[in-house]
Each structure stands twice: as structure tokens, then as C-alpha cells.
Amino acid sequence: MDLLLMTGSDIERRLKVAIALTVLFFVVEIIGSLISGSLSLLGDAGHMFRDIFALLITLSAINLAKKLPTKTKTFGYHRIEIFAALVNGIMLIGISGWIFQEAYIRLLTPHPINSRIMFTVALTGLLVNLYVALTLHGSQDINVRSAFIHVLTDTLSSLAVILASVLIFFTGEMIIDPLLGVGIAAFVLASAIMIIKDALHVLLEFTPKGISFDEIIRDIEEVDGVEDVHDVHLWSLCSNINLIDAHILTNELNLMKVEEIKREIKRRLEKYGIKHATLEFECEACKRNEKVEKMEH
Ligand SMILES: [Zn+2]
Ligand SMILES: [Zn+2]
Ligand SMILES: [Zn+2]
């Protein structure tokens, strides 16, 4: 399929298929871990939970972004995506803590494990992961693309469980399972911390990741007619929209020319994902002339 022709509803359909498969397999892994007694399968299920949530956030971000802003909600629902990610991160810390605790118990008194069931479930998981990755492949949407890369790396965790089940089958060393469980829980914990950090970054209105403040200022100041840029605020609304507000000092007195300057600045800002710019033009320097100004209350 031509990548550029992939429509929004096509992405949605693919995401829904991916979510349905992941939910289905999440349930299969929980049941499989109960029957086989494998903790690493349970850890993998915990990870699947993260994926379901991440895919749901991606899907709802696409849907909620379509909802128009209203007079009482002038930003619409873009931030819900960030809030949901924060909630997901906090829940994942709980899940990994639970697996760590289970692993501790099993390291002290090893549980018997049915390695055949463990193997079968993990192999199915690997196939589901590969299929989901294939489903998400080829999208232009930045979130869908990162979901694709993520699901692809997930195959590693399924492979590890498969390998562990084979080792347990041949050696009878049950301790391999909780050890791998600890590894997977550590991975879940690490991704939880990353998710929370990223969410806080947006919630606290920090400068969007991957964007250089100085570079943007330089880019604006290079526009003909711009004397100075100051009192800048740079933040993101959601993972797809960055915003800026800034004071622009110009010696240009012709309002039509000022309009041209503004248009050129906004054109330059597009490449930073800045889709909403509020520019305050002024002819004589105002009192606030630092690049970054304190906001007081
Ligand atoms: Zn995953
Ligand atoms: Zn958005
Ligand atoms: Zn000013």
C-alpha cells in the first residue's frame, strides 16, 4: 500500500485490530501463567497491559483531537493523552512491584512450572506481537510509528520467555522463571518511569523535547525586519502540537509589512511542530526584555 495514501480511518482500523489482538493475548497470557505457574509469563502479561494502554492512548489521541474546542474548553481534549499516559505509568509501577514481590517469594520457594504450556503461550505471544507489528507498520502518524517500534522490541521479551521454557524443560531448573520475571518487571518499571517523566515534561510545560530554544530564537531573529525576540514561552499541548508565545521587536511601522514578517515567522515555526503561535509585535522595547521572563502571581 502507498504509505502516503493511508487514511486516518485506516490507521484507526489498524489500531483497533492491534488493540483487540493485544487484549485477547493479555487474557491468554494471564490464564497461561496461572495454568503453567510461570511468573515470567505474568510479567509479560503486565507488559501487554502497558501496550494495550499505549495503543488506546494513541487511538483516543487521534479521536479526541478531532473533537472541536468549545468556549469552556478552548484547548479541546488534547491534554487527555498526556494525563492518560501519567495514569498508565503509575499503574505500571504497581504492576512491576507486584511481580517483584511474587518473584521474591518464588526465589525462596521455587514453584513447579509446566514448561510446555509456558512455551506454547509464549510462542503464540511472539506470533501475536509480530502480527500486531505488521498491522501498525507503514503509518505516518508519529505515535503509531513509535508503537510499531515498541511492539517490535517486544518480540525480544517473548523470545526470552520461549528460551526460558526450553531451558526449564531440559534442565528442570524452576528458578530460571522467577529470574526472568525480575528482568521483565525491571523492564516494565523502566518504561513506567520513562512514561511518567515524559508526561510530567508536558504537564509542567517544559520546552518540548527535541526542540532547541536557542535555534528557534535564532530562526525568528533571522527574519528580515525582526530586531529582537524576548519573553518567550515554548511548550506542548500534546505529543503532536507545540505552541509558542513571544514578543517581537521591529522597526517596521507599516502594518502590512509587519503582517508579512509575522507570516514568515509562522512559516519558519512549522518545522518545529509549532502549530499555534501568539506573537506580540512592538516598536519600542518594552520593559520585559529577557529571553525568558518570570511569571509572577
Ligand atoms: Zn510492549
Ligand atoms: Zn493532540
Ligand atoms: Zn516585549
Image (cartoon, rainbow, N blue to C red):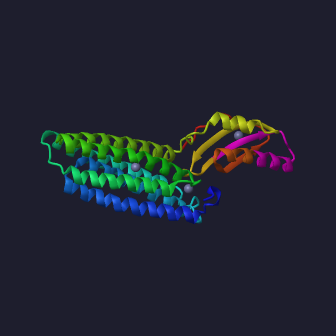
Q: State the residue at coordinates (74%, 44%).
A: 265
Residue 215, x across and y down, in percent:
67, 35
Q: State the residue at coordinates (69%, 45%).
A: 269
Considering only vertical position in the picture, is 163 above or below 51?
Answer: above
Picture quadrant of residue 296: top right
Picture quadrant of residue 19: bottom left
Report whether residue 72 is seen. Answer: no
Considering only vertical position in the picture, is 98 above or below 10?
Answer: above
Q: Is residue 235 left or right of residue 83?
A: right
Q: Which residue lies furthest to the right in this view?
A: 254
Q: Is residue 23 left or right of residue 40?
A: right
Q: Nearer the viewer, residue 172 or 151?
A: 172
Residue 16, x across and y down, in percent:
46, 64
* Magenta highlight range: 244-264
Residue 14 part of the magenta-drawn span: no
Report whether residue 190 is seen. Answer: yes
Looking at the rendering, in which quadrant would you find the C terminus?
top right
Q: In this view, does 78 lie to the left or right of 109?
A: right
Circle count: 0
